[in-house]
């Protein structure tokens, strides 16, 4: 072991588990790629102010969880804690919204950083795949995003997840609700910090995980009783579109995102096998965010799904992903001449789309066969001087154990045929 270890709250992704991680990322992205979303990649860090405004000064992410740094030049930066603010910043910077084609639909995938108390499913470095649809207010767009996330989870074989859905209202009806909620909260027996939160960001109090707080919230006013006609109709349309698409969801009138620029549709994907880190993904509409970061009014909607927790959810359900074989054919040369010949064969197999590997390091037969076994290859090619003199290699089926000589010039075609 080296003197160093991965920093607290982080972990290394190493084979073979890393293959599962990649497959999850790919499976989440797949439905987006075929639904008009273009890939966007933004820097791993941004001006700290972007997140302060774009995530919200009163959120845990900004007050407690940001990794910030000052550059030698004096710029205040932060490692990105989430994707939406960066993606919107980039879309505005490059005028993607002015190209006459709204909504601008983008997807992304990458590392995110939050200074959290590490525990299972909660890390300081984690991975998300996200999607944002910028510049349109259309219930079908909100529904599309929920449907695509559902499709992604189902394609992975996940079953025990639930979709929670709510509407947060808009700038017409939410302030009325906010005031009513505040009135209610002021009458409760809450600690000082929570009371302060009730003044700045009362909706967030609904999200408090503590039981003694939750108990007092039983009779709290609910947003759905305050929605204006526009918000009600919009939400009803989203619900109908999801139902028509066969996507099951649960109405959760307590589901919130505490910031003013989050509007109307909000949703979360939870998995029941994950204990307290049950959210595998979340998202919603953020009609006011663009203006918060200096842009024009651009109603938008998006989500981010956590790759780490999705992998844990698959484990919790005992789902084994069908991963493509890392190595289908493993070549074992015995001697110098065979080394050159089989090396060329392996290169040719690879060019022909067959996953192939080679016993490097001048191993003897025994060690090389052990390596072949460990590689998981379906077939092994073995050749020594005598085989080459006869123009053949030995082809061993690692499942049946059968071995037979194959003409050297036919081996690639033979293997491609057998592997389909
Ligand atoms: P939580 O309530 O669990 O803290 P969150 O509301 O902070 O989640 P979002 O900001 O909505 O999470 O991020 C979307 C998804 O990213 C989450 O549903 C989760 O799967 C994942 N995620 C968020 N924070 C972490 C973390 N620290 N470690 C691993 N995954 C995370
Ligand atoms: Mg969090």
Image (cartoon, rainbow, N blue to C red):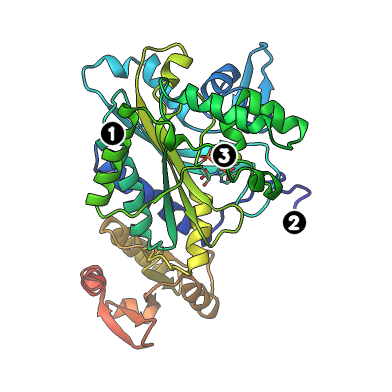
Q: Residue at x 64, y 55 (%)?
A: 120
Q: Looking at the picture, does residue 173 appear above or below residue 281?
A: above
Question: In the image shown, does 328 or 394 lie closer to the viewer?
Answer: 328
Q: Quadrant of ligand 2?
A: top right
The residue under label 2 is 1
State the image coordinates of residue 214 (x, y, percent, origin top left): 64, 46
Q: How far apart are marks 1 and 2 (CA)?
A: 61 Å
- Circle 3 Cα neighbour tier, 10 Å, few/some/many (<14 / 14–19 / ≥20): some
The C terminus is located in which quarter? bottom left
How many marks overall? 3
Where is residue 340, by image quadrant? bottom left
State the image coordinates of residue 320 (x, y, percent, origin top left): 43, 68
Question: In the image shown, does 397 or 211 lie closer to the viewer?
Answer: 211
Q: How far apart are marks 3 and 1 (CA)?
A: 23 Å
Mark nearest the camera among 3 and 1 is: 3
The residue under label 3 is 220
Question: In the image shown, does 300 or 255 lie closer to the viewer?
Answer: 255
Q: Are marks 1 and 2 in contact (CB under 8 Å)?
A: no
Disc ID at residue 233: 1
Q: Can residue 326 be seen in this view?
A: yes
Where is residue 84, by image quadrant? top left
Mark sitting earlier along the chain (2/3): 2
Mark nearest the camera among 2 and 3 is: 3
């Amino acid at each position: 072991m080296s003197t160093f270890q991965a920093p607290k709250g982080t972990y290394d992704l190493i084979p073979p588990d890393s293959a599962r991680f990649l497959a999850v990322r790919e499976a989440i992205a797949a439905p987006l790629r075929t639904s008009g979303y273009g890939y966007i990649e933004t820097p791993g860090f941004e001006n700290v102010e972007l997140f302060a405004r774009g995530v919200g000064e009163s959120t845990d992410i900004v007050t407690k969880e940001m990794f910030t740094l000052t550059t030698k030049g004096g710029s205040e930066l932060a490692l990105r804690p989430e994707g939406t603010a960066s993606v919107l910043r980039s879309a505005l910077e490059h005028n993607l919204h002015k190209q006459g084609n709204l909504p601008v639909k983008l997807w992304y995938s990458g590392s995110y950083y939050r200074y959290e108390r590490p525990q299972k499913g909660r890390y300081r470095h984690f991975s998300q795949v996200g999607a944002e649809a910028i510049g349109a207010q259309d219930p079908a767009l909100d529904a599309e995003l929920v449907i695509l996330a559902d499709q992604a989870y189902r394609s992975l074989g996940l079953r025990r997840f639930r979709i929670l859905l709510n509407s947060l209202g808009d700038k017409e009806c939410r302030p009325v609700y906010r005031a009513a909620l505040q009135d209610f909260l002021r009458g409760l027996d809450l600690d000082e910090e929570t009371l302060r939160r009730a003044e700045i960001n009362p909706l967030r109090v609904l999200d408090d995980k503590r039981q003694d707080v939750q108990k007092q919230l039983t009779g709290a006013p609910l947003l759905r009783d305050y929605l204006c006609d526009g918000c009600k109709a919009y939400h009803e349309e989203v619900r109908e579109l999801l139902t028509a698409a066969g996507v099951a969801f649960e109405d959760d009138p307590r589901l919130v995102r505490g910031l003013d620029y989050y509007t109307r549709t909000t949703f979360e994907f939870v998995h029941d096998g994950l204990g307290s880190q049950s959210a595998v993904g979340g998202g919603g509409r953020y009609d006011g965010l663009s203006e918060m970061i200096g842009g024009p009014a651009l109603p938008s909607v998006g989500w981010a799904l956590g790759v780490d927790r999705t992998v844990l959810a698959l484990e919790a359900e005992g789902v084994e992903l069908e991963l493509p074989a890392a190595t289908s054919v493993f070549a074992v040369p015995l001697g110098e001449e065979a080394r050159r010949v089989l090396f060329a064969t392996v290169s040719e197999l690879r060019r022909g789309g067959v996953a192939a590997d080679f016993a490097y390091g001048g191993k003897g037969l025994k060690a090389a066969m052990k390596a072949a076994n460990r590689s998981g290859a379906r077939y092994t090619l073995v050749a020594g001087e005598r085989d080459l003199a006869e123009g053949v290699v030995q082809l061993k089926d690692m499942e049946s154990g059968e071995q037979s000589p194959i003409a050297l010039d036919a081996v690639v075609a033979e293997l491609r045929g057998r592997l389909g």
